[in-house]
Image: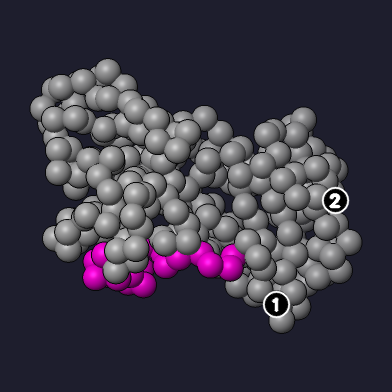
Amino acid sequence: MPELPEVETLKRALTPLVLNKRLVELNFLRKNLRFPIPATKIRKGLLNQEITKITRRGKYILLHAPDGALLIHLGMSGRFIQAPSMKPFEKHTHAVFKFDPEIYLHYIDPRRFGCLLWVPSSQGHPLLNGIGPDPIGKEITADEMKLLAKNCKKISIKNFLMDSKRIAGVGNIYACETLFAAKISPKKIARRISFSQWTLILSNLRDILQKSITAGGTTLRDFHSTDGSQGYYKFSLAVYGKENEPCIVCTQPIKRIIQSARSTFYCKECQKS
């Protein structure tokens, strides 16, 4: 699933294409995403309107118009591709957008876990309610993280980082990579993390996320930017997806364990803390 760097990469790619541009045509070909596409609401709010702002909230992108915003989540395999016309060129095309002048974007989602929803300007949306602070900015400190973790009796630090109610946009890849860089075991209980360790975690998390954004994100399978380009941070991954490969620090084999039904990759030798 695309995480914060991939979603930020898409936001930056969409900005020159649609910001201050008017949507002049919109076709929905398949409405069966994670939630049925509310085609009538989106057309009413977006068609013949100018995109005034593009924002990201965790793993969500919002295309703002005068009366609301198109809420976008890529799910497991969603992507936007710039195309030469309105004509769909891939089997799993769900929506086709034409912005003035002659800018065509196709939303493609083979696994259908993404969503395209409409948020009226006077309302929030349940999917955005309760999302934690964004780790890229200065919305969060080590003190605040330590305080949040205080009441988490049994949750591991890895699962804590992946909880969007506590910190926005961090998924499996960047949780594993961050804990390796900070030399902290993914199995350690979050409330037992010291202030100095939280400082290390946040510092490494921000550094890794920024480097991934610079590299265009991480493409392991489905993620591509609007021009079809891949994310090249996959070549910088230290532990994720590298079971039994030698650790880049100590040469011991990388381990894979299951935490909350997800694979966790780490170095047992380097991550003892």
Residue 123 appears left or right of 232? right
Q: Disc 1 designates what residue?
A: 123
Q: Is residue 61 visible?
A: yes
Q: Which residues are magenta?
A: 128-146
Answer few, some or many: residues within 10 Å of disc 2's Cα (few below 14, many 20 plus, some between 14 and 19): some
Give the number of the mark in front: 1 or 2. Answer: 1
State how far apart marks 1 and 2 are (Cα).
25 Å
Q: Position of residue 185 (x, y in %)?
A: 22, 40
Amino acid tagged 2: Asn
Inspect the magenta stretch and tell me whether residue 22 lies in it. no
Residue 247 appears left or right of 112? left
Tell me which residue sits at (71%, 81%) in the image. 122
Nearest the eye: 140 or 2:
140
Nearest the eye: 115 or 196:
196
What is the tally of numbered marks visible in this picture?
2
Q: Residue furthest right?
A: 40
Tell me which residue sits at (39%, 30%) in the image. 258
* Pointers 1 and 2 in contact (C-beta within 8 Å): no
Residue 128 appears left or right of 122? left
Inspect the magenta stretch and tell me whether residue 145 lies in it. yes
- Label 2: state its secondary structure: strand
Q: Residue furthest front?
A: 153
Q: Position of residue 1 (x, y in %)?
A: 53, 41
Q: Disc 2 designates what residue?
A: 27
Amino acid tagged 1: Gln
Answer few, some or many: residues within 10 Å of disc 1's Cα (few below 14, many 20 plus, some between 14 and 19): few
Say above or below: 91 vs 146: above
Res 14 quadrant in image: bottom right
